[in-house]
Amino acid sequence: QVQLADSGGGLVQPGESLRLSCAASGSISSLRVIGWYRQAPGKQRELVATITTGSTTNYSDAVKGRFTIGRDTTKTAVYLQMNSLKPEDTAVYYCRADSWGDPAVVYWGQGTQVTVSS
């Protein structure tokens, strides 16, 4: 079992930055990839960025060049550094982790609200 605790959301103005954190506990070695997804009101949940155990990263076109995903030095947390935030980045951001294996076991964090507004 894996538990994910995501945090770091808040209210910022356009152009400002935020850093989200996803702390993983439990069977961390069973995880193949950890990522961030977001869901805006009335929209489907969408991928933002992912990072594999081999540190390969992937970003959606909407955030490429503005957001950076990485692991902290303890390797038990994944952060999402969000720069140059736009109003359209407003959403609930969820941490997600996929295990190795087929089918993979998928774990979700509880979500953290990010609001970008002047």
Image: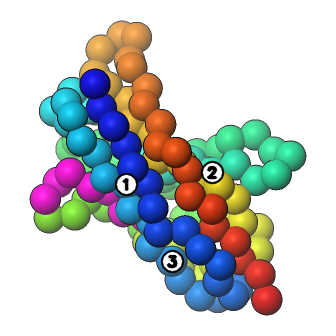
Amino acid on which disc 1 is placed = Cys
Going by the image, does 44 lie left or right of 113? Answer: right
Decide: is 21 above or below 29: below
Q: CA distance from mark 2 to mark 3?
A: 14 Å
Query: What is the x, y in percent for residue 70?
Result: 31, 61
User: Quick one: label 2 or label 3, which is nearer the N terminus?
Assistant: 3
Going by the image, does 39 lie left or right of 50? Answer: right
Query: What is the x, y in percent for residue 31?
Result: 26, 32
Residue at point 76% right, 68% down?
88
Residue 22 disc label: 1
* Crowd tier of the residue under label 2, counting other residues whose Cα lies within 10 Å: few below 14, some 14–19, many 20 or above: many
Decide: is 55 above or below 107: below
Q: CA distance from mark 3 to mark 1?
A: 13 Å
Q: Which residues are magenta?
A: 74-80
Q: CA distance from mark 2 to mark 1?
A: 14 Å
The answer to whether residue 65 is magenta is no
Decide: is 10 above or below 23: below
Q: Mark 3: which secondary structure?
A: strand
Q: Mark 2: which secondary structure?
A: strand
Amino acid on which disc 2 is placed = Arg
